Amino acid sequence: MSGVPNLPMKTEFMLPTNGEVGANRFPNDTEKPCTYLCGNSLGLQSKRSRELVEKEMNVWAARGVVGHFDHPHHGGWVSLADHVDSYFAEIVGQLSPILLQTVAAKLELYVDILGAMENEVVCMSTLTANLHLMLDSFYKPTQERYKILCEAKAFPSDQYAFTSQAQAHGLDPAKAVLEISPRPGEFCLREQDILDVIQKEGPSIAIVILSGVQYYTGQLFPMEAITRKAKEQGCICGWDLAHAVGNVPLSLHDWNVDFAVWCTYKYLNSGPGGIAGLFIHEKQNDSLGPKFAGWWGHNPSTRFQMPPKFSPIPGASGFQQSNPSVFTLASLLGSLEVFKKAGMMVPLRKRSIILTNYLEKLLLESKYYVPHKDIKTRTAPGFTIITPHDSKDRGAQLSLFFLPMGAGVMQKILELLHSHGVIGDERQPDVIRLAPVHLYNDEADCEAAAKYLQVSFDEIS
């Protein structure tokens, strides 16, 4: 495909085969890799992640508890799990000699992926736990300013968190949680509509918190513009970056984002249930400290002296509570090393745009594609694309909406795609999400998806 950067990263990953995923249309080709377009839900396993996890498993077997401080490959599990600066500056450097050149080179992994300072980021816990932690820290409702602004149909876990946080403050979620919806007949939010709501409701909004990339539609929100407008109105601004981190370039520090949370098992490929992360802007260091202290957020120099008084690490690392899993850290590290090898987010974003545009082009050529204007009148099986067309308004994901609505077409197509080795995922009742991920998908994957989508429609039509 012309213009795609030369990034042969596919060989860095473990690719499920047709036989392993149960693609029964290929009885004589079961060892062939399937068409995996589901990295927006769970990224593939990198070979480097497997290698690093196996090393840590071997150390656990050989040294037991001694491995915390006496480790054959690096300084020990204690330093591996300390905090983001030691994790990325020290441990990545020790496990990967290519990164030993300068401190700047060692730190650029998360600095590049998130656009953050080293003291603003920490790997810890899980996404929703971190979201609750940040909301409890930043959501300070008053009689005048008490609303949480979010997108309608945010990921359910986020919606549950917003509702429960409002209830914890004695507020009615129906009044405290302000949801903004697309215009009638549209699937995505317009930038100006979001900005207009913030302008109008600003004095009553305590926190603006949206998804960097909307999980259902794949819409990439204009994070810089929304953050700026929120700050102009005196609102705290946070982001759920579960579908954005490792997918699109971010500049959290320069955008003046107050906080952000994310998981790492989608585009960062850390493995199912992998460790999550959070960002707190360094400007909050003097005014905001951890409310719920834990020993791993304590100053590392005295942590194992077990002092009675908590002395938090400055910045995001002070919010750590328990020591994180060494194996999830090692798995994440393996994937991040592949990001480093690929040149980080600038070339990856270029590749992502080209691949997603190519997949969209193939889908638009299908005889089963239905323009938005014809959705309501469509009676035969077909699909439309509800993800924005402009590449600046989306990441790697395309969301296909199947018609007629509520007729069960999506489930039939999903099963048929699976039988042909095309792995996407569904969002009930009518959406299949396909994501040509920049690290390991290629032109052939896009062509296979378009081909077998056509075949599947032919079978049910």
Image (cartoon, rainbow, N blue to C red):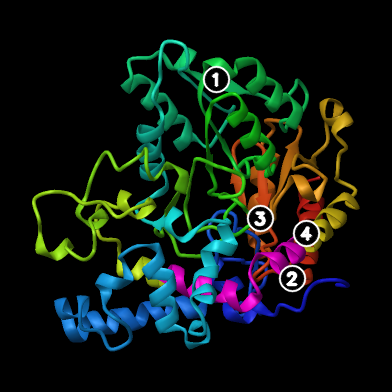
Q: Is residue 97 left or right of residue 388?
A: left
How many neighbours does mark 3 have within 10 angstroms: few (below 14), some (14-19), or many (20 or more)? many
How many neighbours does mark 4 have within 10 angstroms: few (below 14), some (14-19), or many (20 or more)? many
Q: CA distance from mark 4 to mark 1?
A: 33 Å
Q: Which mark identifies residue 178?
A: 1
Q: Tell me which segment is drawn in magenta.
A: 331-353
Give amino acid for label 4: Ile
Q: CA distance from mark 3 to mark 1?
A: 27 Å
Give amino acid for label 1: Leu
Residue 91 in the image: state x and y as whole percent: 38, 76
For label 3, the SS is loop
Which residue occupies the foreground of this view, 257 or 342?
A: 257
Q: Which residue is mark 4?
A: 353
Q: How many marks?
A: 4
| 357 is within the stretch colored magenta | no
Q: Which residue is mark 2?
A: 442
Q: Is residue 221 visible?
A: no
Q: Residue at x 69, y 37 (%)?
A: 225
Q: Which residue is mark 3?
A: 248
Residue 39 in the image: state x and y as whole percent: 59, 60
For label 2, the SS is loop
For label 4, the SS is helix
Quarter containing the C terminus? top right
How many neighbours does mark 1 have within 10 angstroms: few (below 14), some (14-19), or many (20 or more)? some
